[in-house]
Amino acid sequence: VLRTIKNKAAQKQYYTAHQIPTAAYTILQSATEISEHQHLLPAVQKLAEGGYDGRGVQVIDTLGDVSKGFNEQSVLEKKVRIKKEIAQIVAVDQQGKNVLYPPVEMIFNPGLNLLDLQLCPADIKQNVLWKVEAIALAVVRNFNSPGIFAVELFVDENDDVLVNETAPRVHNSGHHTIEAHYSSQFDMLWRIILGYPLGNTKPILSSIMVNIIGSEGHAGPAHYEGLEDVLRIDNAFVHIYGKLQTKPGRKMGHVTVLSNEKQDLIHKANKIKQALQVVSREQ
């Protein structure tokens, strides 16, 4: 499983081999090969190994962008007209039994290509939900492995669902489960490891999660401006990751908010984004 998942090229080949829908792609060894696959443009080039949190990703819209490409093994993936980005967490025990958490809707910062906001449950149609669950289960079942799997998917403008990538671990898209669900992803992983029954994945309340990101123009010892204001917000749970140094775009923590009302969640998330800034101060 790890051998497949740690390499994006191997991941894509795995989806193809098991007839799991994914965006059209080809595997490259150098940037010069891009010109041989013009039918995939506009595209996104992703390093096969070593990329994370938006790193190792390059947009190739036209042949004029080839000079920006990576000269090592990578995946050239045709751009999808994305309506929504969804993450589906699946837990599998040692006997192969599985449970699914409600899927979450991910909203990304386009400049940093990092998760900005995340809403649970995802606001999707019932038929799209069925596709998301069925495809995520197909991804996981073919691994034949216990564990926690976060399957990231695209929903396109035609409501077709395509797998983007899979993470075989507790994942940023599941951090909201700490407060918002009866059994968090971390509790669930311990249950799997210890051979205990799988936990209850139902939500206690709907939730939204805000990533705390290092502010632009700040690099050095981390200081959290506006933290006290955020701590005054009802049903807001702050998690600081303990990183001493900040830099632009670095994930420094997250805040989860619980509420029965979607508009209340969005209002509080925007309030948190405006109030909380990670800046650097000289020691």
Image: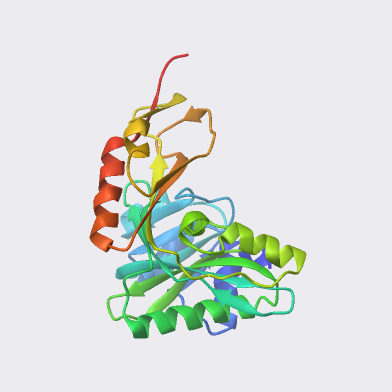
Q: Position of residue 26 (x, y in %)?
A: 49, 70
97 left or right of 233?
right
Q: Position of residue 91 (x, y in %)?
A: 61, 70
- Of residue 249 and residue 67, the one placed in the foreground of this image is 249
The quadrant in which the N terminus is found is bottom right
Question: In percent of the image, x 45 and y 39: which residue is there?
Answer: 250
Question: In percent of the image, x 31 and y 51: which residue is there?
Answer: 110
Residue 202 appears in the figure = yes
Counting every numbered tag in the picture gives: 0
Question: In percent of the image, x 62 and y 78: which residue is there?
Answer: 98
- Of residue 226 and residue 248, the one placed in the foreground of this image is 226
Q: Position of residue 10 (x, y in %)?
A: 61, 68
- The quarter of the picture where residue 95 lies is bottom right
126 left or right of 19?
left
- The quarter of the picture where residue 104 lies is bottom left
253 left or right of 105?
right
Residue 24 appears in the figure = no
Q: Position of residue 70 (x, y in %)?
A: 49, 51
- Of residue 117 and residue 247, the one placed in the foreground of this image is 117
Can you say whether 206 is above or below 39 in the image? above
The single residue placed furthest to the right in the displayed view is 194
Question: In percent of the image, x 40 and y 68: which residue is there?
Answer: 86
Can you say whether 214 is above or below 22 in the image? above
- Of residue 171 and residue 188, the one placed in the foreground of this image is 188
